[in-house]
Amino acid sequence: MKPLTINFRSKAALTLADAQIQQSIEHVYTGFFKGRLTAAGNTPDWEHLRTKGKAIKDHTIAHLDYYLGVLADNVEKNGGTVFFADDAEEARRHIIDLAHKRKIKTVIKSKSMVSEEMGLAEAMNDEGFETVETDLGEYIIQLANETPYHLIAPAIHKSRADVAKLLDDNYKDGDRVPDATELTLLAREKLRGVFERADMSVTGVNFAVAESGSIVLVTNEGNGRMSTTVPRVHVAVMGMEKIIPSIQDLSTMLRILIRSATGQRISTYVTMVNGKRKPDEEEGPEEFHLVIMNNGRQKLLEDPLMRESLNCIRCGACLNACPVYRKVGGHAYGWVYPGPIGAIVSPVLTGLKDASNLPSASSLCGACHDACPVKINIPRMLLELRYRTAEGSADENERTSSAKERGIWKAWRMGMMGRKRFDIGSRIASIVMKPLSRNGWLKKAPPPISGWTSTRDFPAIAKSSLKSRLKKRSGGSK
């Protein structure tokens, strides 16, 4: 998927002006966010579980090379194969070559953000394979030729009428809008034949358990189970950070993931895959392949200030809690990962220069940090990325601030560093603003502060400082 992070401002403006999308994404708050709060409140040891989850991820990422080796060894012991891909292109090419060699015709996909990251479905269709998403939300998105809007609910921005138009060729404006059950049955009718003829599946990985070589899928639809058992070839794709050490750790991670994602105590399906079908098993694939992708994650791993972002378990809780995401939606972020975690991951993986607006798309309210089940300090990392865009840090290519902007802030800093300088600056600003203000407010300020008044009135600088007014009131005594 080509990053379009540079278009954040224009995409955000379009979303803010779309009343239908604004209504649709409000369900993020009323559904997932409140569901998480209820589930957390009903879990007596919730904060302990969050702390434990953070410790598991911190330990795993600190010893990532070791656990990846253990995982690979155990997958191969289970009869599978493991391929380590440096980037999305290498991962994509490996899967396509595999499909060609196995003479695959139809590929079914279960929801996977990593496959979105590598643009796999589009590439396989271009190669001549029939490639179909089987998660309902992803299927809707594929029919609309769009990208996912949310980590958990890819089509949350679509109304029922929008979905009906995509699923029913005979539907037209003015017809009765089918309810959710009817829409699901329409999708099932279309997809059932695809499942029957599919000879390869590609799924994501919620967790990979190193000690057993298992991959774990957490779903609320039956498509995950069918994708891992019906086709003769199963390919699982994962980012290298999706690993945990043990089955015991899995118990903790499942509890915090599911409660944080949807507010459920347990999802409808938790599927564990341990390689290909054994001789005494009646169902399952003849081949199992695991593709583990880097695609820039090494940059996060080697950056001590950004490494914590690899702890993310893709629950979407930070999106649901974020007041910015709930207004600008998922497509504004311009790449696979939206919301607060996307504002960290996307700039590092795709380039901070084009994605410089993403770290600034935050009020720094801390809601994302409070919601995160593994306690990722997202606001701290957003501030670090803001600093890098302003100052360039070790890499001058990261800096996006202009010399003019830096000069303004340096002047402001100088004025704030001394009382006399501050008073002089305030008097000058008051004189300059006087012709522009009405009744103590600026409704339209000139550049470079025009942005402040584009959506709000700006209070004019007072004619005299508080100190001087207090001094005058006390008759000149100090």
Image (spheres, helix red, strand yellow):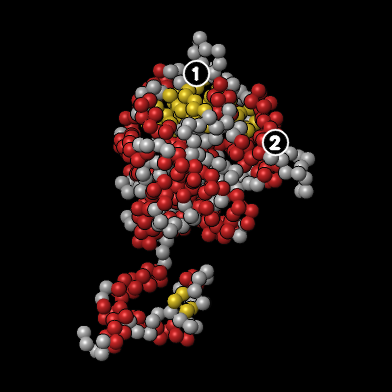
Task: Name which residue lies at 49% across and 13% down.
Answer: 278
The total number of labels drawn is 2
Residue 334 horizontal/vertical position (percent): 53, 51
Crowd tier of the residue under label 1, counting other residues whose Cα lies within 10 Å: few below 14, some 14–19, many 20 or above: many
Residue 399 higher or lower than 181, as above or below: below
Nearer to me, 291 or 8 = 8
Residue 97 higher or lower than 183, as above or below: above
Residue 158 horizontal/vertical position (percent): 63, 46
Crowd tier of the residue under label 2, counting other residues whose Cα lies within 10 Å: few below 14, some 14–19, many 20 or above: few
Instruction: Please give the residue where the numbered disc 2 appears in the rendered image.
Output: 182
Nearer to me, 48 or 209 = 48
Task: Name which residue lies at 47% across and 20% down.
Answer: 275
- Where, quadrant-wise, is the C terminus in this rendering? bottom left
Which mark identifies residue 276?
A: 1
Picture quadrant of residue 434: bottom left
Whether residue 120 sits left or right of residue 431 in the image: it is right
Q: Tell me which label, 2 or 1, sits earlier in the chain.
A: 2
* Residue type beneath disc 1: Lys
